[in-house]
Each structure stands twice: as C-alpha cells, then as structure tokens.
Amino acid sequence: MLLSLVIVLAAAKLGGEIFERMGQPAVLGELVFGVLLGNLNLLGVNALEFLRTDPDMATFAQIGVLLLLFEVGLESNIHEMLALGGSSLLVAVLGVIVPSFLGWGVSAWMLPQEGFLVHLFLGATLCATSIGITARVLADLGKTSSPESKIILGAAVIDDILGLMILAAVSGAITAADTGDTFSLVRITLIVIKAAVFLGGAIAFGNWVARGMFYLATRLRVRGVLLAMALGFCFLLSYLADRIGLATTVGAFAAGLILDEVHYPELRNRFERDLKELVHPVADFLVPIFFVLMGIRVDLSSFGKVEVLGFALLLSLAAVTGKMSCAFGVLGRDLDRISVAVGMVPRGEVGLIFAGVGAALNLGGRPVISQPIFAAVIIMVIITALITPPALKASFARGETRRAIASPSRESS
C-alpha cells in the first residue's frame, strides 16, 4: 500500500505540473500519467501491474470521489444558483437531455449487442459538466464576473445535481435488473423521486443538524475539530444515501451544499481558516488518486481495434454537439450564447465518476462499462477537456469583437 501511494502520488503531481505548464488542467495530467503507468506492460515492464487491482488504492480513490463532490458542494451556493434565473436552468436542462439522447443513439448504433440499460448508462455519462475545469479556464481568462460565466457555472452546478440523480436512477435500474427484478419506468421514476427527496430533505434538515454541529465546534478547543466534524458529516450523508439505494456521491454533494459557510458567520470568528481551506489539503491528497487510478485502468491495447477508436470519436462528437445545444437556452439579447455553450463542453471529473461507477456495476455477470468502452469514455473526457480552453478563449474574443463593432453603430444611430 505504501509503495502504491508513493508511485500514484508522484505520477499525479508530476503529470499535473507538466499539464499546468502547458496551460491545461492538472486533472488531465493525472489522468494521462495514470494511463502511462497502467500500460507499461506494452513496453515489457510488468512491475506495476499490481496497481490495477490494488484494493487499498481502490478504497482511497472511492474516498477521493466523495471529497471531490464534497468540495463541489462547498463551492456551490444554492441561493446564488436560484438567483441566476431561467438561463442557467434552461441551459442545464438542455445540457443534460440532448447529450444523453445523442450518447444513447451512438451506443445503440455502435454497440447493437448490448442491452438497453447499457445504452442508457453510456448516454448518461455525457450529461454532466466539469465545474472544476470550466471554473479554472474562466479564472485564467479573467471572465468569472461576466454574465455568461455566471450562467455557465450555475448551469454546471444544476447539471451535476441532475447528473447525480440520473446516475442514481440508472444505477438502481441496472442493479435491480442484475438481481432479477423487472425493469420499469416506474422504478426509474421512484429512484429519481427518492434522490430529489433525499437532496431536499438533507438540505432542509441538514441545516438544522449542521448548526448544532458548528455550535459545538466553536466551543471545543481540541485541534482539528472543525475538519473532523465536517468530514464526519460528509461521510454520514454518503452512508445514508447508500443505505436508501442512492450513489454515495449524492450524499457527499448534499453535505457540501449544507455546510456552505455563508450560513455560519460564527465560524469565521472562531477559526482562523475557513472550512474550504481545511478540506483542500485532504482532497489534494486523495482526489488525484482517483484520477490516476482511472487512467491506470485504461487498456491502450484495446485501441488497436478500429471499432473502439471509431466509438471514442463518435462519443466525443456527441458530447460536444450535445452541449452546443445549450446556446438555445440562453435568455437575453446581449449575451454570448456560443461562449456559454462552449463553457458547458468539458466532462472532466464527473464523466470519470460515471465511468468508474459503470465499471463497478455488473449486468448479466459482466461489467456495464467493459474495458474497451471504458477506454472510449476516457478518451471522450480527455478530448472535451483539451478543446475547451482554446475554444472558450476564442469564443469570448469573438464575442468582444462583435460587441465592439455593434457599439459604434448603435451610437451613430
């Protein structure tokens, strides 16, 4: 286990450093270096094959996913999301429905031997948007305060909520089908309702629980009490989500939304560092393990098959085209619709979470996401993440030029 940690963490930080110097998100470096580690056997080096099936690394990666969604929840303010208006909601809904439908179509066409639930799951992997990658690009461009950026980030958060609900529904249907229960739309609907009730109930009652927890934290003098209580709360909601048949990530995300420190001013008076700052070092340790492990599980030898490469490219095309439909959801005459759509393209960490869940689910005695399909999904994630930064920069520049041209004409008229 210790040797695995040394190798995985070194690969994560080295890969992240190289890709950040190239102007790309660190997550891509972690993923790519994971792919390199997992495929050294193609060069005759088999010493690191144990990383692919190391149960300790799998456990660390699963906890890393929870912390990742917990951080996303902490960075999301539900009141700001509601205040962003109809554009964010409409963009998010289009960004879920259209890519999912296109992904389902590509899967049904390219993988006719697979069942309906596999096609449905693959379509679902295209629905989410990477908040982390998009937020980083917008910050680098100095556009975080623009109305287009607020729509993008608000829609991305809503996308994640809808995506987690879809993940819970589809995973539940697959689990039921694998155990011999009949698949039905009623079952899917019940799981979606269950996820919505869990999120709503967790936010409503969790605020009351969190206030009591934070009140206790402000009165205890022991070191690290705030971090310990916050992580305990995250893991508790993750456990409760699992107990009622939902993905643990739903609980982790809900915990982050609840523990938004905007609601707890007394914490800023008691602690020198806020909760986000305390969680970051722990997440920086565990989250990269998840991305590297996802890369390690990609078998590059599967890309020797033309059909796998074709599937990866068509899946990527569906992922990009589906998100471009978000332009039709932007309300307002002076907003740059294309920039909003481009900002919704990257899948990043959320797409990898879907792929990881699919690889762990079984249907008919084999994984829902087989090794070739898993590799194709990883390629889709890499492509959408790589093309977004330059495309978004060019789109914003085009929008500014268009507005500059339009302004003199308005003044003259």
Image: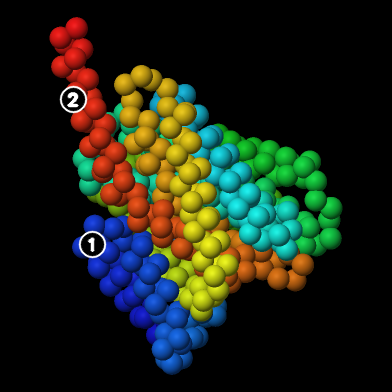
Q: Quadrant of residue 373?
A: bottom right
* Residue at the extreme front of the image, as rendered: 306
Give neighbour class at mark 1: few <14, some 14-19, many 20+ (Cα, 10 Å).
few
The secondary structure type at the circle numbered 1 is loop
Up-down relation of residue 175 to residue 53 (above or below): above
Give neighbour class at mark 2: few <14, some 14-19, many 20+ (Cα, 10 Å).
few
Q: In terms of depth relative to the viewer, which is nearer, 43 or 135? A: 43
- On residue 404, the disc is 2
Amino acid under disc 2: Ala
Q: Position of residue 179 (x, y in %)?
A: 80, 62
The secondary structure type at the circle numbered 2 is helix
Q: Which residue is located at x 77 percent, y 62 percent?
A: 178
* Residue at the extreme top of the image, as rendered: 413
Q: Which residue is located at x 19 percent, y 14 percent?
A: 409
Q: Is residue 388 visible?
A: yes
Q: Quadrant of residue 42?
A: bottom left
Up-down relation of residue 220 to residue 64 (above or below): above
Locate residue 289 relative to residue 366 in the image: left or right: left
Q: Position of residue 88 (x, y in %)?
A: 44, 30
Mark-to-mark CA distance, 1 and 2: 31 Å
Q: Please identify, in this view, whether the residue under mark 1 or under mark 2 is nearer the observer.
A: 2
Amino acid under disc 1: Met
- The colour scheme applied to this rendered structure is rainbow
Q: Position of residue 95 (x, y in %)?
A: 50, 39
Q: Which residue is located at x 52 percent, y 49 percent?
A: 318
- On residue 22, the disc is 1
Q: Which residue is located at x 34 percent, y 49 percent?
A: 388
Q: Quadrant of the N terminus?
A: bottom left
